[in-house]
Image (cartoon, grey):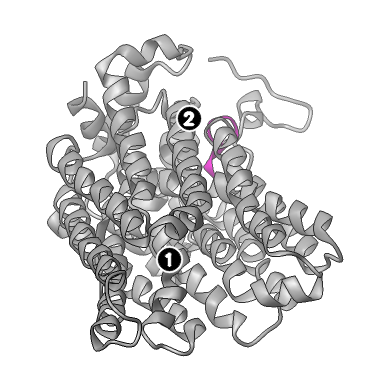
Amino acid sequence: MSFHETEDGRTSSDLRKPFLHTGSWYRMGSRQSSMMTSSQMIRDRSVSVLACVLIVALGPIQFGFTGGYSSPTQAAIIRDLNLTVPEFSLFGSLSNVGAMVGAIASGQIAEYIGRKGSLMIAAIPNIIGWLCISFAQDTSFLYMGRLLEGFGVGIISYTVPVYIAEIAPQNMRGGLGSVNQLSVTIGIMLAYLLGLFVNWRILAILGTLPCLILIPGLFFIPESPRWLAKMGMTDDFESSLQVLRGFESDITIEVNEIKRSVASGNRRTAIRFSDLKHRRYWFPLMIGIGLLVLQQLSGINGVLFYASNIFQSAGISSSDAATLGLGAIQVVATAVSTWLVDKTGRRILLTISSAGMTLSLVVVAASFFIKGYVEDTSSLYAAMGILSVVGVVGMVIAFSLGMGPIPWIIMSEILPVNIKGLAGSIATLANWFIAWLITMTAPLLLAWSSGGTFTFYLFMCAATVVFATVLVPETKGKTLEEIQFSLR
């Protein structure tokens, strides 16, 4: 490659940079290590990677806050804007519609302008969307704001797990990847909690905070080294990897592995849909799409939608407090998964999680079927109400232990680098479409037959047990390059 100097003294190669440059603070550290004595923590690879993960985790917190916003605000928004229940239901579902559009664009955006650049693009419509909702006087601004939020969330849902997988060391990738789902649950719980104390307009203003903090934070973390390598930015790639592993770490082996992987992928070769017939492409795509679709077909959104009714039928007077408690349980269970995933492995957690969800849904479905045959005033009816609560809590715990975080981790790990943009978009779109479908059909199905609805969900969870046990490869302890080589 030839280098030509421009009038201001920069070479032409300097002009070929990511949308957000990786920054100069760590370059100075690599050249003048004596100046870094006051920042010894940056030399520790786990602290450096953890700092990056905590910054991008603001995106999934925004994701969760968007999902949790409609629950505590429904009555107030309907009253203040004089909406009908169908109009508010449309408001709630528009985030899924926007997310599907964002999912379609997410892979290509992340490929062309980088992981950090795509998060910047996702943050801006989220902020604008929350402001539209906060100042809405009618449905037009309300709906526009929800669509913009959904678009940003659709990009975030793909980009964050991919970025984390690409920067994390192999022995920490599962735990750090689980931070994505942990942050989503924290965002949901924050929306529930803050919704108890502030009105819906103030809550929407608070919804801008994660992205307002994320935008400046992106300037202080390195771009994904694997994306930089794919784009041919060798110097930036090695500098980014060095800061992630520590300035005193030897990154030679990892650099060579990434270079070999990128060379074999041949980034200049256009991937066509006809290429997906090769096992190295269709198998990981099937696993990625399969897990993300089964995650939603488990009915978790339907169960959470109906949770407040289940709590009320069990005699719990404050359904808002109970919903907040369920959100807290999700956070704790997902935190446990974050600790377990690099110790036990992905596949065994998926199997245990889906089996636990199946058993929990058996309890919920049976309790509803029995309630249909006994008197409302009987003690058995009350007992079945309590049993259904136990089943719902058990399902949420089981989901959070595996089926919540791990499908996103595996999707980000197994997709080959040269189809990651296309395949990731397809998998993310499939997840959001099924999520929208479950959310829209849950009220109709539950009105038809609560027991029948939960029976359908439990069969989907049972199918997930088989899928995870038979088809899903174990990725614990392997580099991304080793994973992709094993799937050829």
Disc 2 to disc 1, C-alpha distance: 31 Å
Q: Residue at x 25, y 83 (%)?
A: 383
The residue type indicated by label 1 comes to Leu
Q: Which residue is at the front of the view, 218 or 370?
A: 370
Q: Which residue is mark 2?
A: 421
Residue at disc 1, secondary structure:
helix
Residue 325 seen from this side: no
Residue type indicated by callout 2 = Gly
Q: Sequence-wise, which precedes: disc 2 or disc 1?
A: 1
Q: Which residue is pictured at 49% across the width and 54% down the height?
A: 444
| 10 Å crowding of disc 2: few (<14), some (14-19), many (20+) | many
Q: Residue 117: image x %, image y %?
A: 61, 43
Q: Is residue 114 magenta?
A: yes
**Residue 402 in which image quadrant:** bottom left
- Which mark is nearer the camera, 2 or 1? 1
Magenta part of the protein: which range? 110-116
Percent from the top left, x then y, of residue 454? 32, 57
Check if mark 2's residue and mark 1's residue have beta carbons within 8 Å: no
Residue 472 position in % (x across, y down): 19, 38
The residue where tag 1 is placed is 304
Q: In the picture shown, does residue 98 fall above or below 185?
A: above
**Residue 424: quadrant of the picture:** top left
Residue 269 lies left or right of residue 386; in this view the side is: right
Examine the rendered structure and indicate whether residue 372 appears above or below residue 384: above
Residue 73 picture quarter? bottom right
The residue closer to the viewer here, 433 or 52, is 433
Relative image position of residue 203 (x, y in whole percent): 68, 75
Q: Residue at x 56, y 30 (%)?
A: 108
**Which structural element holds mark 2?**
helix
The question of residue 251 being in magenta is answered with: no
Q: Residues within 10 Å of mark 1 (few under 14, many from 20)?
A: some
